[in-house]
Image: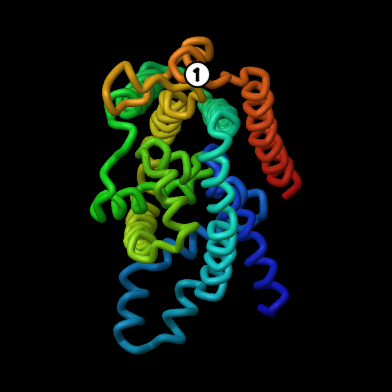
Amino acid sequence: MNLKHYLGVVFKGICMGAADVVPGVSGGTIAFLMGIYQELIDSIRSVNATAIKLFFSGKFAQFWKHINGNFLCSVFIGILISVFTLAKLMQFMLEFYPIHIWSFFFGLVLASAIYILKGLDKWNLKNILSLFVGIGIAAFICLASPAETPNEYWFIFLSGAIAICAMILPGISGSFILLLLGKYAFVMEAVSTLNIPVIAVFGCGAIVGILSFSHFLGWLLKKFYMQTIALLSGFMIGSLLKVWPWKNPGVVEGVDFPTDPFTYEQISGAPSLIGYSVICALFGLVLVFGIEYLAAKAQKNK
């Protein structure tokens, strides 16, 4: 493969990275739309016992070829370019335009939940139970967990391990997982300020997570496909509580409870900006549905 090909792969990685920074937009969906999803999954899964054996035997050229190293390296370079470029923008929006950006995120996550639910072609008892279990777990995490989760390295490592797995799931966003864990703003700030220890720990968690989860996910989707899709849909529906634009921190100390815009105005003294919120949420909905439409069209034309 020539340089032009790999520059194209870097560009596709940039598009994936841009999606992964925004909660509700799936990097996996972008990879599918760009035509590199299957190669990405196969390359990640190729980092197995055989690859480790080749590496520690000193057969580096064979190891690199076995894991499709040029391709993986190009994709991840593109992703990193996007993440480091857009992190400052996300941090700025969260600080100065919180209602606008949370409304946008709400639209993104809602659209993603609807998209994943469309993959359910059977509404039997198992699938319905899986859906409600997912909703219940996500809602419990959103309402029972503190607005600020631990900043210790073990939790950052765990967050990286869980969030990166979303990259290989079309429809699920890694940033959405970070939101659910209460670590989105923290990680974006670490990236924008080049907090190397945090970035390194998060990166190590991501490496461990994606290498281990890719195999487990393949097994899970193969054995319990519908239940897994229903559970993931439930997670996203329940997590809408987390991205609701108007919060009331006074219900339970340390927990941001969703509230209505009018109560928000009373307790915060700030305008609720309902009109802007609706526009931002609709923009998020249209963005996700547009991406999914293009992905479906690309698959149909294959």
Which element type, helix, strand or loop, lies under badge 1? loop
Q: Which residue is mark 1?
A: 269
Task: Report the coloring of the rendering.
Answer: rainbow
Q: Residue furthest right?
A: 301
Residue 38 at what x, y percent from top left? 55, 56
Q: Residue furthest bottom?
A: 58
The residue depicted at 51 percent of the width and 72 percent of the height is 68
Residue 196, relative to residue 29: is it above or below? below
Residue 253 at what x, y percent from top left? 27, 24
The residue depicted at 52 percent of the width and 46 percent of the height is 91
The residue depicted at 31 percent of the width and 87 percent of the height is 57
- In this rendered view, identify the residue nearer to me: 85 or 5: 85
Left or right: 84 in relation to 145? right
The answer to whether any part of residue 285 appears in the image is: yes
User: Number of numbered discs present?
Assistant: 1
Residue 97 at what x, y percent from top left? 58, 35
Residue 6, relative to residue 85: is it above or below? below
- In this rendered view, identify the residue nearer to me: 220 or 12: 12
The answer to whether any part of residue 126 appears in the image is: no
- In this rendered view, identify the residue nearer to me: 119 or 31: 31
Left or right: 277 in relation to 247? right
Residue 98 at what x, y percent from top left? 53, 33
Quarter of the view holding residue 135: top left
Left or right: 225 in relation to 82? left
Query: Which residue type does callout 1 highlight?
Result: Gly
Quarter of the view holding residue 220: top left
Quadrant in which the N terminus appears? bottom right
The residue depicted at 36 percent of the width and 38 percent of the height is 182
